[in-house]
Amino acid sequence: MWYDGFSEWLEMLTIFGFFFGVAVLIANNARKKREMELLRLAIEKGQHIPNFELPQTSKYGTLKAALIFLALGIGFLLMVIFEEFFGYGEISIGLIPLFVGLALLISWNIEKKPEAQNKA
């Protein structure tokens, strides 16, 4: 079957992803600490502080996460069904990114509609 060596690769990718994620979090935290320290020093010296534009957060972040998790669940479910009942294990692995892509398209379409209404 296609998943004979898959568990070994999955373990290796998970371990690599964990260490990569920890390194990214440490680097991001260090950068934020440096920025806050510079801001604190500027305030103490009475210097002009430029207006910081915080990134706009989407109102639909929870909806996007819910759609992605729902798509993952449906993709895994259909992958198992296709493998067990129809024997299409090799092809059915592609259902997971297919459904995640569909979830992102749905989320993009939902987010796009209010922006178009605000501009009009």
Image: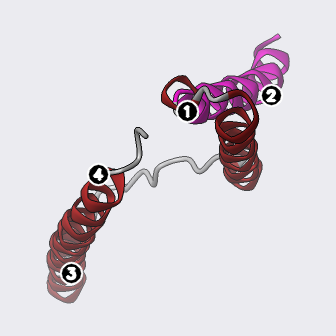
Which of pointers 3 and 4 lies earlier in the amino acid sequence? 4
Q: State how far apart marks 1 and 4 are (Cα).
A: 14 Å
Residue 49: quadrant of the picture? bottom left
Q: Nearer the viewer, mark 2 or mark 4?
A: 4
What amino acid type should be assigned to the residue bearing mark 4? Answer: Gly
Q: Residue furthest bottom?
A: 44
What amino acid type should be assigned to the residue bearing mark 3? Answer: Lys
Colour mapping:
secondary structure
Secondary structure category for the residue under label 3: helix
Q: State how far apart marks 3 and 2 are (Cα).
A: 36 Å
Query: Residue 110: which numbered mark, if any?
Result: 2
Q: Nearer the viewer, mark 2 or mark 1?
A: 1
Q: How many marks?
A: 4
Q: Name the residue carrying label 3.
A: 33
Which percent across, then down, holds residue 17? Answer: 26, 63
Which of pointers 1 and 3 lies earlier in the amino acid sequence? 3
The one nearer the camera, 2 or 62, is: 2
What span is colored magenta in the figure? 94-120
